[in-house]
Image (cartoon, rainbow, N blue to C red):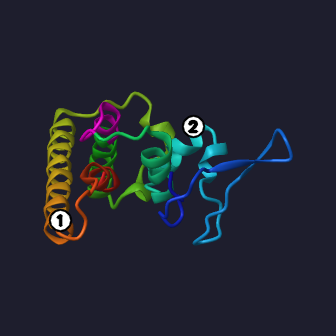
Amino acid sequence: MICVECGQPVNNVHHRVHGAEETLTRCEYCKKVADKYVEYELVIIFLDLVLHKPQAYRHVIFNRMEYSDAWLSFRDVQLAFFIIVLEAYHQTQSQHQGGWADLSPAKSWKGYTPTLEWWKEFGLLMVLSSIQLLLLCLASIVTARALFARKFPIVKYNYLAKSII
């Protein structure tokens, strides 16, 4: 488990006080609540993921998913796909009419069907987002291996890839 605010390791995100009562653990480094998302509803976590808040991503990747020595689990691949779809949609919206702020009111969307051109553009942006993410992961792992292989015999490259995703 890690603190979602600063990324430092913590033993647990909540602890017992006075019998059955539980409180959230404070991080020793930044003195903030280690993982506020433990008490949040799934919808709030999802909204924070859509808003690209790093704390929400840290919660999902490091505190919600089980530890694994394997490379990447199926859940990690699902999360990467979800992030790629969000990134492609964000790029699509920001290329047209200046971005999110210039979208039409909701009543003008009634009966709207995206054109084939829009789907082609969205598909291309998904492919480009996938390539960008893959290249970033590979470059980071190669760099980490070059810098830390001699100093630290065991480096969890899967966690490096998860943190990039």
Distance of label 2 from label 1 (alpha carbons): 38 Å
Q: Amino acid at mark 2?
A: Leu
Decide: is 1 above or below 6.
above
- Crowd class of label 1 (few under 14; some 14 to 19; many from 20; radius 10 Å): few
> Which residue is under mark 1?
149
- Residue positioned 67% across, 49% down in the render: 14
Question: What numbered label is drawn on residue 42?
Answer: 2
- Residue positioned 18% across, 46% down in the render: 130
Of all residues shown, which one is farthest toward the top? Answer: 111
Question: As rendered, which of 161 and 145 lies closer to the eye?
Answer: 145
Number of labels in the image equals 2
Q: Are marks 2 and 1 in contact (CB under 8 Å)?
A: no
Q: Position of residue 57 (x, y in %)?
A: 44, 51
Residue 74 lies in the magenta stretch? yes
SS of the residue under disc 2 = helix
Left or right for 74, reference 102:
left
- The range drawn in magenta is 70-79
Q: Position of residue 125 (x, y in %)?
A: 19, 47
Q: Position of residue 109 (x, y in %)?
A: 42, 36
- Crowd class of label 2 (few under 14; some 14 to 19; many from 20; radius 10 Å): few
Question: As rendered, which of 158 and 123 lies closer to the eye?
Answer: 158
Left or right for 22, reference 147:
right
